[in-house]
Amino acid sequence: MSSFPQKHIDIVGIGASTLDRFIVVDYYPTGREVQQVVSSTTDGGGPVATALAVAGKYGARTAMIDSIGDDMVGRHILDDFEKYNVNTAAVQVERGANSGVATILVKHSTGERAVFFERSTASEPKFLATHKQLIEDAFILHINGRHRNLMRAAIDTAKEVGTIISLDGGAQRYDEDMKPITEDSHIVIVARDYAEKYTGTTNLEEACRIIHDRGALIAGVTDGANGSYFVWPDGTTYRCKPFLQQTVVDTTGAGDSFHGAFLAMLTKTLFKMADSTNTSTINETSSSLKAVDLLLNCTHSDLEKAAIFASAVAALNTQGIGGRSPLPSLDQVYKLMELE
Protein backbone atom coordinates (compact mmCIF):
# COMPACT_ATOMS: atom_id res chain seq x y z
CA MET A 1 0.00 0.00 0.00
CA SER A 2 1.34 3.43 -0.96
CA SER A 3 2.45 5.77 1.82
CA PHE A 4 1.40 8.63 -0.50
CA PRO A 5 -2.17 7.77 -1.58
CA GLN A 6 -3.84 9.77 -4.35
CA LYS A 7 -6.27 11.28 -1.85
CA HIS A 8 -3.28 13.11 -0.36
CA ILE A 9 -1.15 14.07 -3.37
CA ASP A 10 -2.02 15.80 -6.66
CA ILE A 11 1.35 17.18 -7.80
CA VAL A 12 4.82 15.72 -7.21
CA GLY A 13 7.82 17.99 -7.78
CA ILE A 14 11.50 17.25 -8.39
CA GLY A 15 13.93 20.15 -8.12
CA ALA A 16 16.10 22.27 -5.86
CA SER A 17 14.78 23.70 -2.58
CA THR A 18 16.61 26.81 -1.43
CA LEU A 19 16.50 29.68 1.02
CA ASP A 20 16.28 33.07 -0.71
CA ARG A 21 17.64 36.18 0.98
CA PHE A 22 16.41 39.42 -0.59
CA ILE A 23 18.12 42.78 -0.28
CA VAL A 24 16.39 45.76 -1.88
CA VAL A 25 18.84 48.48 -2.99
CA ASP A 26 18.57 51.83 -4.73
CA TYR A 27 21.19 50.80 -7.29
CA TYR A 28 23.57 47.94 -8.00
CA PRO A 29 27.07 48.52 -6.62
CA THR A 30 29.80 49.15 -9.19
CA GLY A 31 32.74 49.00 -6.84
CA ARG A 32 33.75 49.33 -3.22
CA GLU A 33 31.08 51.30 -1.36
CA VAL A 34 28.67 51.42 1.57
CA GLN A 35 24.95 51.58 0.79
CA GLN A 36 21.97 51.43 3.12
CA VAL A 37 19.43 48.80 2.09
CA VAL A 38 15.86 49.83 1.42
CA SER A 39 14.46 46.60 2.91
CA SER A 40 15.24 42.89 3.21
CA THR A 41 13.46 39.61 3.75
CA THR A 42 13.95 35.83 3.67
CA ASP A 43 11.78 33.41 1.71
CA GLY A 44 11.74 29.82 0.52
CA GLY A 45 12.97 29.42 -3.06
CA GLY A 46 13.66 27.15 -6.01
CA PRO A 47 11.50 27.07 -9.19
CA VAL A 48 9.76 23.71 -8.63
CA ALA A 49 9.67 24.17 -4.85
CA THR A 50 7.98 27.55 -5.18
CA ALA A 51 5.52 26.24 -7.78
CA LEU A 52 4.50 23.53 -5.30
CA ALA A 53 4.16 26.09 -2.51
CA VAL A 54 1.90 28.20 -4.73
CA ALA A 55 -0.19 25.19 -5.74
CA GLY A 56 -0.43 24.18 -2.09
CA LYS A 57 -1.61 27.64 -1.09
CA TYR A 58 -4.42 27.43 -3.63
CA GLY A 59 -5.67 24.02 -2.62
CA ALA A 60 -3.62 21.40 -4.46
CA ARG A 61 -2.05 18.51 -2.52
CA THR A 62 1.66 18.60 -3.27
CA ALA A 63 4.84 16.70 -2.39
CA MET A 64 8.50 17.58 -2.98
CA ILE A 65 11.36 15.22 -3.85
CA ASP A 66 14.80 16.72 -3.13
CA SER A 67 17.81 16.48 -0.83
CA ILE A 68 18.94 19.22 1.55
CA GLY A 69 21.41 19.63 4.39
CA ASP A 70 20.70 19.24 8.09
CA ASP A 71 21.79 22.84 8.73
CA MET A 72 19.75 25.80 9.92
CA VAL A 73 18.96 26.70 6.30
CA GLY A 74 17.54 23.21 5.72
CA ARG A 75 15.28 23.53 8.75
CA HIS A 76 13.99 26.85 7.46
CA ILE A 77 13.29 25.28 4.05
CA LEU A 78 11.23 22.51 5.65
CA ASP A 79 9.34 24.97 7.87
CA ASP A 80 8.44 27.08 4.86
CA PHE A 81 7.17 24.03 2.95
CA GLU A 82 4.92 23.21 5.91
CA LYS A 83 3.49 26.73 5.81
CA TYR A 84 2.31 26.09 2.24
CA ASN A 85 1.05 22.54 2.86
CA VAL A 86 3.82 20.86 0.84
CA ASN A 87 4.46 17.23 1.90
CA THR A 88 8.20 16.84 2.64
CA ALA A 89 8.32 13.12 3.49
CA ALA A 90 10.35 12.56 0.29
CA VAL A 91 12.85 15.35 1.01
CA GLN A 92 16.06 13.63 2.10
CA VAL A 93 18.03 15.44 4.83
CA GLU A 94 21.75 14.70 4.53
CA ARG A 95 23.85 14.91 7.66
CA GLY A 96 26.71 17.42 7.44
CA ALA A 97 25.59 18.86 4.08
CA ASN A 98 24.84 22.50 3.38
CA SER A 99 21.51 23.53 1.91
CA GLY A 100 21.23 25.86 -1.08
CA VAL A 101 21.06 29.61 -0.54
CA ALA A 102 20.42 32.45 -2.99
CA THR A 103 21.23 36.07 -2.19
CA ILE A 104 19.17 38.36 -4.42
CA LEU A 105 19.75 42.06 -4.95
CA VAL A 106 16.54 43.79 -6.06
CA LYS A 107 16.69 47.24 -7.66
CA HIS A 108 14.11 49.37 -5.85
CA SER A 109 13.06 51.44 -8.87
CA THR A 110 12.43 48.60 -11.33
CA GLY A 111 12.23 45.27 -9.48
CA GLU A 112 15.17 43.94 -11.51
CA ARG A 113 17.19 41.19 -9.84
CA ALA A 114 20.82 40.13 -9.53
CA VAL A 115 21.12 36.62 -8.08
CA PHE A 116 24.13 35.12 -6.26
CA PHE A 117 23.66 31.39 -5.68
CA GLU A 118 25.32 28.95 -3.27
CA ARG A 119 24.57 25.42 -4.47
CA SER A 120 23.63 22.75 -1.94
CA THR A 121 26.34 20.20 -1.10
CA ALA A 122 23.74 17.49 -0.48
CA SER A 123 23.95 14.49 -2.80
CA GLU A 124 21.40 14.06 -5.59
CA PRO A 125 18.60 11.92 -4.17
CA LYS A 126 18.38 8.32 -5.35
CA PHE A 127 15.21 7.11 -7.06
CA LEU A 128 13.43 5.04 -4.42
CA ALA A 129 10.43 2.75 -4.44
CA THR A 130 8.51 5.38 -2.45
CA HIS A 131 9.24 7.94 -5.16
CA LYS A 132 7.97 5.54 -7.82
CA GLN A 133 4.74 4.94 -5.92
CA LEU A 134 4.32 8.64 -5.29
CA ILE A 135 4.57 9.42 -9.01
CA GLU A 136 2.32 6.52 -10.00
CA ASP A 137 -0.47 7.79 -7.76
CA ALA A 138 -0.27 11.50 -8.61
CA PHE A 139 -1.97 13.51 -11.33
CA ILE A 140 1.14 15.52 -12.26
CA LEU A 141 4.94 15.25 -12.07
CA HIS A 142 6.46 18.77 -12.18
CA ILE A 143 10.14 19.15 -13.17
CA ASN A 144 12.61 21.78 -14.38
CA GLY A 145 15.78 19.84 -15.21
CA ARG A 146 17.41 19.51 -11.79
CA HIS A 147 18.52 16.09 -10.50
CA ARG A 148 18.83 14.69 -14.03
CA ASN A 149 19.28 10.98 -13.16
CA LEU A 150 16.41 10.99 -10.67
CA MET A 151 14.28 13.03 -13.06
CA ARG A 152 14.79 10.61 -15.96
CA ALA A 153 13.75 7.65 -13.80
CA ALA A 154 10.71 9.62 -12.67
CA ILE A 155 9.79 10.47 -16.28
CA ASP A 156 10.01 6.79 -17.25
CA THR A 157 7.63 5.90 -14.41
CA ALA A 158 5.22 8.69 -15.31
CA LYS A 159 5.14 7.63 -18.97
CA GLU A 160 4.46 4.01 -17.99
CA VAL A 161 1.39 4.83 -15.91
CA GLY A 162 0.04 7.95 -17.61
CA THR A 163 0.95 10.54 -15.00
CA ILE A 164 1.12 14.00 -16.60
CA ILE A 165 4.67 15.36 -16.94
CA SER A 166 4.88 19.15 -16.52
CA LEU A 167 8.07 21.01 -17.46
CA ASP A 168 9.09 24.48 -16.28
CA GLY A 169 11.63 25.67 -18.85
CA GLY A 170 13.16 28.74 -17.24
CA ALA A 171 15.35 31.40 -18.81
CA GLN A 172 19.03 30.41 -19.16
CA ARG A 173 18.10 26.78 -18.38
CA TYR A 174 18.03 25.25 -21.86
CA ASP A 175 20.78 22.91 -23.05
CA GLU A 176 20.79 20.11 -25.62
CA ASP A 177 20.30 17.52 -22.87
CA MET A 178 16.93 19.16 -22.15
CA LYS A 179 15.63 18.57 -25.69
CA PRO A 180 14.45 14.94 -25.16
CA ILE A 181 13.12 15.86 -21.71
CA THR A 182 11.08 18.65 -23.25
CA GLU A 183 9.77 16.31 -25.95
CA ASP A 184 8.76 13.75 -23.29
CA SER A 185 6.70 16.27 -21.31
CA HIS A 186 2.93 16.67 -21.66
CA ILE A 187 2.74 20.24 -20.34
CA VAL A 188 5.60 22.44 -21.52
CA ILE A 189 5.37 26.03 -20.30
CA VAL A 190 8.65 27.86 -20.84
CA ALA A 191 10.15 31.32 -20.69
CA ARG A 192 10.86 33.27 -23.90
CA ASP A 193 14.60 32.56 -23.69
CA TYR A 194 14.03 28.80 -23.37
CA ALA A 195 11.50 28.80 -26.21
CA GLU A 196 13.79 30.66 -28.58
CA LYS A 197 16.73 28.34 -27.90
CA TYR A 198 14.62 25.17 -28.11
CA THR A 199 12.68 26.10 -31.25
CA GLY A 200 15.08 28.43 -33.07
CA THR A 201 12.45 31.15 -33.62
CA THR A 202 11.74 34.48 -31.92
CA ASN A 203 8.07 34.36 -32.94
CA LEU A 204 6.44 33.10 -29.76
CA GLU A 205 3.22 31.95 -31.42
CA GLU A 206 5.29 29.91 -33.85
CA ALA A 207 7.43 28.65 -30.95
CA CYS A 208 4.29 27.39 -29.18
CA ARG A 209 3.25 25.56 -32.32
CA ILE A 210 6.69 23.93 -32.65
CA ILE A 211 6.66 22.84 -29.00
CA HIS A 212 3.20 21.35 -29.51
CA ASP A 213 4.22 19.60 -32.73
CA ARG A 214 7.19 18.04 -30.94
CA GLY A 215 4.91 16.26 -28.49
CA ALA A 216 3.56 18.62 -25.83
CA LEU A 217 -0.18 18.39 -25.26
CA ILE A 218 -0.16 21.86 -23.72
CA ALA A 219 2.53 24.18 -25.08
CA GLY A 220 3.01 27.58 -23.49
CA VAL A 221 5.48 30.45 -23.62
CA THR A 222 5.46 33.19 -20.98
CA ASP A 223 6.77 36.64 -21.81
CA GLY A 224 6.38 38.69 -18.65
CA ALA A 225 4.43 41.89 -19.12
CA ASN A 226 3.63 40.87 -22.71
CA GLY A 227 1.46 37.97 -21.55
CA SER A 228 1.63 34.32 -22.56
CA TYR A 229 0.88 32.14 -25.57
CA PHE A 230 -0.61 28.65 -25.61
CA VAL A 231 -1.52 25.77 -27.88
CA TRP A 232 -4.07 23.37 -26.35
CA PRO A 233 -4.20 19.58 -26.90
CA ASP A 234 -6.44 19.83 -29.97
CA GLY A 235 -4.14 22.38 -31.62
CA THR A 236 -6.22 25.47 -30.78
CA THR A 237 -4.16 28.58 -30.01
CA TYR A 238 -4.81 30.97 -27.12
CA ARG A 239 -3.27 34.29 -26.09
CA CYS A 240 -3.49 35.09 -22.40
CA LYS A 241 -3.29 38.83 -21.78
CA PRO A 242 -1.18 40.09 -18.86
CA PHE A 243 -2.57 41.80 -15.77
CA LEU A 244 -0.35 44.87 -15.91
CA GLN A 245 0.49 46.54 -12.60
CA GLN A 246 1.31 50.22 -12.15
CA THR A 247 4.50 49.36 -10.31
CA VAL A 248 6.65 46.25 -9.99
CA VAL A 249 8.38 45.69 -6.66
CA ASP A 250 10.12 42.37 -7.37
CA THR A 251 9.78 39.88 -10.23
CA THR A 252 11.24 36.96 -8.25
CA GLY A 253 8.98 33.93 -8.47
CA ALA A 254 6.62 35.40 -11.08
CA GLY A 255 7.24 32.51 -13.47
CA ASP A 256 7.24 29.93 -10.69
CA SER A 257 3.96 31.26 -9.31
CA PHE A 258 2.49 31.13 -12.83
CA HIS A 259 3.32 27.41 -13.03
CA GLY A 260 2.03 26.65 -9.55
CA ALA A 261 -1.22 28.53 -10.05
CA PHE A 262 -1.83 26.97 -13.48
CA LEU A 263 -1.27 23.45 -12.12
CA ALA A 264 -3.41 24.13 -9.05
CA MET A 265 -6.38 25.13 -11.20
CA LEU A 266 -5.75 22.23 -13.58
CA THR A 267 -5.74 19.66 -10.77
CA LYS A 268 -9.12 20.93 -9.59
CA THR A 269 -10.48 20.19 -13.05
CA LEU A 270 -8.76 16.80 -13.20
CA PHE A 271 -10.10 15.87 -9.77
CA LYS A 272 -13.68 16.72 -10.76
CA MET A 273 -13.31 14.67 -13.94
CA ALA A 274 -11.80 11.74 -12.05
CA ASP A 275 -14.47 11.92 -9.36
CA SER A 276 -17.19 11.76 -12.00
CA THR A 277 -15.71 8.45 -13.23
CA ASN A 278 -15.67 7.03 -9.66
CA THR A 279 -11.98 6.17 -10.13
CA SER A 280 -10.40 6.15 -6.67
CA THR A 281 -6.82 5.91 -7.91
CA ILE A 282 -6.30 7.44 -11.33
CA ASN A 283 -3.21 5.45 -12.36
CA GLU A 284 -3.92 2.31 -10.36
CA THR A 285 -3.89 -0.19 -13.24
CA SER A 286 -3.23 -0.19 -16.96
CA SER A 287 -6.98 -0.33 -17.57
CA SER A 288 -7.81 2.62 -15.31
CA LEU A 289 -8.44 6.10 -16.65
CA LYS A 290 -5.06 7.83 -16.65
CA ALA A 291 -4.27 11.44 -15.79
CA VAL A 292 -3.07 12.04 -19.36
CA ASP A 293 -6.47 10.83 -20.62
CA LEU A 294 -8.17 13.37 -18.37
CA LEU A 295 -5.91 16.14 -19.68
CA LEU A 296 -6.93 15.31 -23.25
CA ASN A 297 -10.57 15.78 -22.27
CA CYS A 298 -10.20 19.20 -20.60
CA THR A 299 -12.30 21.88 -22.27
CA HIS A 300 -10.92 25.11 -23.71
CA SER A 301 -12.79 26.94 -20.97
CA ASP A 302 -11.09 24.92 -18.23
CA LEU A 303 -7.62 25.51 -19.69
CA GLU A 304 -8.20 29.21 -20.36
CA LYS A 305 -9.41 29.72 -16.78
CA ALA A 306 -6.22 28.07 -15.52
CA ALA A 307 -4.08 30.37 -17.68
CA ILE A 308 -5.97 33.52 -16.64
CA PHE A 309 -5.78 32.55 -12.97
CA ALA A 310 -2.03 31.91 -13.31
CA SER A 311 -1.51 35.26 -15.02
CA ALA A 312 -3.34 37.10 -12.25
CA VAL A 313 -1.38 35.33 -9.49
CA ALA A 314 1.95 36.06 -11.21
CA ALA A 315 1.07 39.74 -11.63
CA LEU A 316 0.02 40.21 -8.01
CA ASN A 317 3.11 38.35 -6.81
CA THR A 318 5.30 41.15 -8.22
CA GLN A 319 3.81 43.57 -5.69
CA GLY A 320 6.03 42.45 -2.81
CA ILE A 321 9.50 41.13 -2.06
CA GLY A 322 10.10 37.40 -2.46
CA GLY A 323 8.74 34.53 -4.50
CA ARG A 324 6.18 33.30 -1.96
CA SER A 325 5.56 35.91 0.75
CA PRO A 326 3.66 38.32 -1.58
CA LEU A 327 1.31 35.61 -2.88
CA PRO A 328 -2.23 37.03 -2.98
CA SER A 329 -5.33 35.55 -1.40
CA LEU A 330 -7.90 33.86 -3.63
CA ASP A 331 -10.22 36.83 -3.09
CA GLN A 332 -7.53 39.20 -4.37
CA VAL A 333 -6.91 37.03 -7.42
CA TYR A 334 -10.58 36.75 -8.33
CA LYS A 335 -11.10 40.47 -7.79
CA LEU A 336 -8.31 41.26 -10.26
CA MET A 337 -9.73 38.78 -12.76
CA GLU A 338 -13.16 40.42 -12.51
CA LEU A 339 -11.69 43.86 -13.22
CA GLU A 340 -10.42 42.78 -16.62
Image: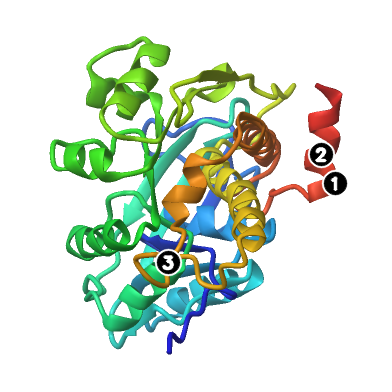
Q: What element carries label 2?
A: helix
Q: Position of residue 295 (x, y in %)?
A: 49, 45
Q: How far apart are marks 1 and 3 (CA)?
A: 33 Å
Q: Quick check: 102 left or right of 95?
A: right
Q: Which type of secondary structure does the marked residue at label 3 adopt?
A: loop
Labels 1 & 3 near each other (Cβ < 8 A): no
Q: Do the residues labelled 1 and 2 touch (CB within 8 Å)?
A: yes
Task: Return the residue at label 2.
Answer: 334
Q: Nearer the viewer, residue 54 or 240?
A: 240
What is the residue that sits farthest to the left in this orientation?
176
Q: Which numbered tag is attached to residue 300?
A: none
Residue at mark 1: 331
Judged left or right of residue 239, residue 157 is: left
Nearest-to-viewer mark from 3 and 2 = 3
- The disc placed on residue 283 is 3
Can you tell which quarter of the image residue 92 is in?
A: bottom left
